Image (spheres, helix red, strand yellow):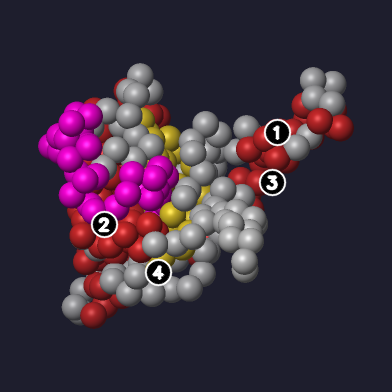
């Protein structure tokens, strides 16, 4: 168990060697490369997912140790249902098992678990364990751990717009007052800080329908390492890379440019 006391967090941040204002509050990770990792070793794809699940604990623990406000993990997209049934079934079993066995880690690190994505289609055992983990961690006050499971960003935005439209139809929301905040409060991630940094593993240069609304101004770091080989040091390297970026948010910071 990582020490997440204020003193320990301050020490971990100091050891990182990055200025306090240069550490991202919120990080999102597209965990890619499990299948390629397994294939390179002549193993079935589910074995790669099993190894990838082991990495999740280490990265969640490291993020909590650094005092992050939020960590969002792209676990299973709506499009992933198109994968072979054997692989999907293995993944669903893995998710249920993970949610059961990681509850002590969640509670020990004061983590609040959130689910991003649609419930329809998820197996009953996965929903049961997901709901229980969300429930028991709801009174925690530390880092948000958002699990994007059965998730697609376009679907999330569609659902948010439908909810806003229903409020406008019912007369509880003035259409003239619909703005970005109105949409944001109806997203699955409502109340969670938007990602400052998106990390994608396995060298792929796309966002794959992930948090399209929320990452409008996020910095992106792509790493060639496959997810099962991703270590805490890779996370720290990504944060160091982030700290070197000049975030302008559409502004000109230097009048001489």
x then y, percent, for residue 207: 52, 64
Sequence order check: which comes first, mark 1 or mark 4? 1
Sequence order check: which comes first, mark 2 or mark 3? 3
Between the C-alphas of marks 4 and 3, the distance is 28 Å
**Residue at 74% of width from left, 33% of height from top?**
164
SS at circle 3: helix
Q: Magenta includes 9? A: yes
x then y, percent, for residue 17: 24, 53
Label 1: which residue?
182
Label 3: which residue?
158
Label 4: which residue?
222
**Residue at 55% of width from left, 34% of height from top?**
190
Sequence order check: which comes first, mark 4 or mark 3? 3
**Residue at 52% of width from left, 31% of height from top?**
191
- Which residues, given as a range, are shown in magenta? 1-29
Between the C-alphas of marks 1 and 3, the distance is 13 Å
Instruction: Give the label, 1 or 3, closer to the camera.
Output: 1
SS at circle 1: helix
Sequence order check: which comes first, mark 1 or mark 2? 1
Mark 2 vs 3: CB contact within 8 A? no
Mark 1 vs 3: CB contact within 8 A? no
Q: Is residue 146 left or right of residue 184?
A: left
Q: Is the residue marked by circle 2 packed among few (<14), some (14-19), or many (20+) residues within 10 Å?
A: some
Between the C-alphas of marks 2 and 4, the distance is 13 Å
Q: Is the residue marked by circle 4 packed among few (<14), some (14-19), or many (20+) residues within 10 Å?
A: some
């Amino acid at each position: 168990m990582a020490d997440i006391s204020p003193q320990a967090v301050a020490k971990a941040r100091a050891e990182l060697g990055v200025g306090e204002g240069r550490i991202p509050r919120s990080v999102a990770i597209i965990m890619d490369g499990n299948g390629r990792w397994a294939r390179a070793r002549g193993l079935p794809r589910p074995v790669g997912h099993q190894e990838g699940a082991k990495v999740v604990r280490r990265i969640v623990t490291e993020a909590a140790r650094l005092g992050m406000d939020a960590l969002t993990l792209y676990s299973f997209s709506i499009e992933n249902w198109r994968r072979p049934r054997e692989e999907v079934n293995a993944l669903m079993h893995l998710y249920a098992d993970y949610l059961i066995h990681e509850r002590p880690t969640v509670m020990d690190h004061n983590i609040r678990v959130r689910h991003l994505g649609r419930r329809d289609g998820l197996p009953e055992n996965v929903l049961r364990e997901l709901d229980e983990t969300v429930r028991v961690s709801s009174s925690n006050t530390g880092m948000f751990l958002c699990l994007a499971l059965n998730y697609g960003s376009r679907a999330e935005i569609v659902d948010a717009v439908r909810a806003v439209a229903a409020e406008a139809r019912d007369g509880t929301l003035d259409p003239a007052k619909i703005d970005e905040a109105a949409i944001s409060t109806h997203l699955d991630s409502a109340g969670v800080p938007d990602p400052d940094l998106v990390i994608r593993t396995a060298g792929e240069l796309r966002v794959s329908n992930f948090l399209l609304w929320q990452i409008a101004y996020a910095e992106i770091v792509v790493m060639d390492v496959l997810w099962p080989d991703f270590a805490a040091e890779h996370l720290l390297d990504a944060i160091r890379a982030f700290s070197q970026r000049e975030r302008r948010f559409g502004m000109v910071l230097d009048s001489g440019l």
